Image (cartoon, helix red, strand yellow):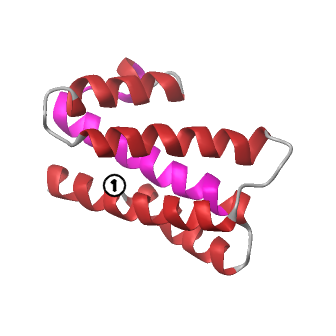
């Protein structure tokens, strides 16, 4: 969770610097690292067991934490949307909109708070 919180702080700072793409990347990684922490706590497995790819981690998060009711479907959707936006920000030709990234950072805060409750 330390990495997740650092990535969230970076996302907030990058928004202040008007770097929407950079903020999008860091907000996604905040959520990605938090999802990995939640899976490690819940499943007690090593990263290699479920996180060989981003999609693999997102699918494992959905399977083991959302579908069983541990976490809300909204959190699962937020993680998937964040990945889509991050791919656009990192690899697309156009920048993401600042307003969309501000929403994503807000979603990341909510996501991390939910994972903190789960892993506490």
Range covered by the magenta-colored residues = 23-48
Indicate the position of residue 114 as horizontal and vertical percent values. 23, 55
Instruction: Confirm whether residue 83 shows in the render.
Output: yes
Q: Secondary structure at mark 1?
A: helix
Looking at the rendering, which quadrant does residue 98 occupy?
bottom right
Indicate the position of residue 2 as horizontal and vertical percent values. 39, 60
Say whether residue 47 is magenta. yes
Q: Residue at x 80, y 40 (%)?
A: 92
Determine which residue is flagged by label 1.
Answer: 111
Instruction: Confirm whether residue 37 shows in the render.
Output: no
Residue lying farthest bottom? 16
| Quadrant of the drawing holding the N terminus | bottom left
| Left or right: 71 in relation to 46 | left
Q: Residue at x 25, y 52 (%)?
A: 115
| Left or right: 52 in relation to 76 | right
Q: Nearer the viewer, residue 30 or 40?
A: 30
| Left or right: 116 in relation to 89 | left
Residue lying farthest right? 93
Q: Residue at x 20, y 26 (%)?
A: 67
Q: Is residue 106 above or below residue 117?
A: below
Q: Main secondary structure of the magenta part?
A: helix
Q: Nearer the viewer, residue 46 or 37?
A: 37
Looking at the rendering, which quadrant does residue 58 occupy?
top left
| Quadrant of the drawing holding the C terminus | bottom left
Q: Nearer the viewer, residue 45 or 63?
A: 63
Q: Residue at x 27, y 22 (%)?
A: 63
């Amino acid at each position: 969770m330390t990495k997740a919180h650092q990535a969230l702080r970076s996302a907030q700072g990058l928004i202040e610097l008007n770097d929407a793409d950079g903020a999008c990347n860091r907000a996604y990684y905040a959520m990605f690292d938090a999802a990995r922490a939640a899976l490690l706590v819940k499943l007690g497995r090593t990263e290699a067991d479920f996180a060989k790819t981003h999609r693999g981690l997102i699918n494992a998060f959905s399977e083991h934490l959302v579908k069983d009711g541990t976490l809300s479907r909204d959190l699962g959707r937020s993680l998937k949307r964040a990945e889509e936006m991050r791919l656009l920000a990192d690899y697309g030709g156009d920048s993401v909109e600042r307003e969309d990234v501000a929403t994503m950072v807000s979603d990341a805060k909510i996501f991390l708070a939910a994972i903190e409750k789960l892993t506490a």
